[in-house]
Amino acid sequence: MTGTTAQRTAVTSALSDVTPVELEAMTRAVALARRGPVHGPNPRVGCVLLDASGATVGEGWHQGAGTPHAEVAALADAARRGTDLHGLTAVVTLEPCNHTGRTGPCTEALLAAGVARVVISVEDPNPQAAGGADRLRSAGVDVRTGVLPDEGRALLGAWLPSVERGRPFVTLKLATSLDGRVAAADGSSRWITSDVARRHAHDLRAEVDAIVVGTGTALADDPSLTARNAAGELHGHQPLRVVVGHRDVPGGARLRGPGGELVHVRTHDPRVVVDALAEREVRHLLVEGGPTLATAFLRAGLVDEVHAYVAPVLLGAGPVAVGDLGIGSIDGALRLTTTGVHHLGPDVLVVATPTASASSGPAQPGARPATTHEEH
């Protein structure tokens, strides 16, 4: 049986064990979860509680680190409605946690309430929190997993691969002319892309946990690395602003102004950067520049997704978006799979992911050590 066939069989089996009402509730739970923040160390999770007749008696979603988890929020909602919690079915997008972190285990909250059945979309890959389904089964709760798994995984976004890989999910952002230049021959680069594309890029910043640039870019461009709305105002969430390299960030730099916390990682090794940010519970990292840093992350196999904003502009000369990747022939090219193409005013955004072999961790064969030396 092929992997694809096995997956389809598992999904079909899971769906045969749930009711149409439960499937509808799972769709609702996914919609509820999307109300939670995309950024942060915790996943977006939604929960719907059903009574014996299939009526919804409670709803909840996780609103961010330190707040009640979706299951607890749904139980509280049902209690406020005066519902008898005993014997309910909980439909939840992610396996209930089985550990004590900022909040208590959701498994114990469900058991204390007397929930009789739990329907789950995605099993938790986090070894610290996993085991909730087994804990519930051992207590006599009827548990079903793998219900609408594609929707559940899509909901989790960067959080899921970050937890699975034990490091931040890395998005590389490129903004180039049609011929791949990031600046003109004289170094000027404002603005290659349109204001529509730049607004989109700011919305992306508002969804990530951290933005990283090299010291060369920090000193040459004096960026603020903030996330702003169309009116130029700061978004409520501001990502960490990370500078990689050994030179100091000047006291008057815009990076020290309003915005997210400034983090200086004094290294040229991208692996050290992702390890340092993993310790800060960064789940989604945006690499913005410059070309030397982009090249280092690509050579290290640490890029999980590329967002390439391409403007219909030709420069003919000037620095290119990516440097030497150690590729000697077309056979060794770093191939990517396009997952989305979006028109942004006059520009185009291409979203693509490297193949599994290209993003698995080690540098490509023949590549030099994956370091960045943005010390110009």
Image (tube, rainbow, N blue to C red):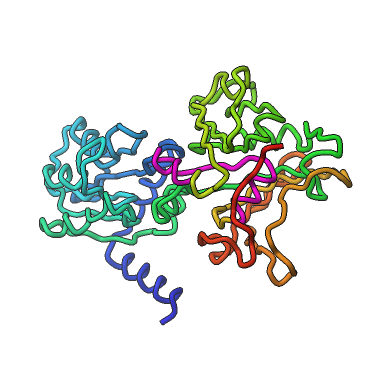
Camera-nearest residue between 87 and 195: 195
Q: Residue at x 62, y 46 (%)?
A: 372
Q: Is residue 194 magenta?
A: no
Name which quarter of the figure residue 325 lies in: bottom right
Q: Is residue 187 left or right of residue 25?
A: right
Up-down: is 138 above or below 13? Answer: above
230 displayed left or right of 179: left
Which of 208/69 is in front? 208
Magenta residue span = 274-299
Q: Is residue 21 visible?
A: no
| Outermost residue to the right | 316
In the image, residue 155 lies at what x, y percent? Answer: 44, 49
Task: Look at the image and say whether residue 278 sits in the magenta stretch.
Answer: yes
Q: Which image quarter holds the C terminus?
A: top right
Q: Which residue occupies the extreme bottom position in the image?
A: 1
Q: Nearer the viewer, residue 135 or 270?
A: 270
* Quarter of the N terminus within the rendering: bottom left
Residue 75 shows in the view: yes
Residue 9, given in percent of the width and then of the height, sits at 37, 74
Place of residue 109 in the rendered image (x, y in percent of width and height, measured from the top left) = 17, 42
Write the residue at 27% across / 43% down.
56
